[in-house]
Image: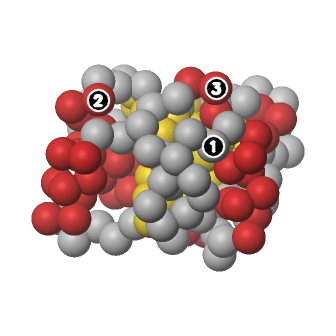
Amino acid sequence: MLVLDENLPAGQRLLLRRQRIHFRFVGEDLATSGADDENLLPILHRLPQPTFFTLDSDFFRQDWTHPNYCLAWLDVRRAEAAEFIRGFLRHASFNTQARRMGTVVRVHSGGVVCWRAKLRSPQSFAWPGK
């Protein structure tokens, strides 16, 4: 299950829907609008293996890794969010739900930086072809 934070622009959500990427949205489908970051984590625990996308850098915390979800900080311009969500979901290291679980990631133009639950240092992955 894909979950988008309320800080992703409506136009980017529309692009994802046009590309047939199904998701739930904080503020409409889950939680209330303006929910604190810490209050979203219990909601993610109740969902079946969610991947949560946000533009909020506060979610890129090693101590928030959990085996049953993925937190993905989109460190990109707001107008590029949909493009990078799609790229992340197609990346060979993250293209299945199982490969994403237990990670906290930073998605940026140079690739993906990933914290995994039992590793002390982050891993870096380049975009294919770069």
Q: Are the residues tagged 3 and 1 within 8 Å (C-beta)?
A: no
Q: Amino acid at mark 1?
A: Ala
Q: Nearer the viewer, residue 129 or 76?
A: 76
Q: Quadrant of residue 79?
A: top left
Horizontal and vertical percent position of residue 44: 68, 60
Q: Residues within 10 Å of mark 1 (few under 14, many from 20)?
A: few
Disc on res. 62: none
Q: Residues within 10 Å of mark 3 (few under 14, many from 20)?
A: few
Give the residue drawn at x 76%, y 63%: 45
Of labels 3 and 1, the one closer to you:
1
- Can residue 92 be seen here? no
Q: Mark 1 = which residue?
A: 35
Disc on res. 78: 2
Instruction: Determine whether 85 is above or below 21 in the image.
Output: above
Q: Amino acid at mark 2?
A: Arg
Q: Amino acid at mark 3?
A: Asp
Q: Nearer the viewer, residue 77 or 62?
A: 77
Earlier residue among tags 3 and 1: 1
Q: Mark 3 = which residue?
A: 58
Give the residue drawn at x 68%, y 49%: 40
Instruction: Tell me how far mark 2 sits from mark 3, CA to CA.
Output: 16 Å
Give the residue drawn at x 34%, y 57%: 90
Horizontal and vertical percent position of residue 30: 55, 63
Query: Could you say whether the residue bearing mark 1 is in a helix, strand or loop?
Result: loop
Q: Could you tell whether 34 is left or right of 85 in the image?
A: right
Q: Residues within 10 Å of mark 2 (few under 14, many from 20)?
A: some
Earlier residue among tags 1 and 2: 1
Give the residue drawn at x 34%, y 71%: 22
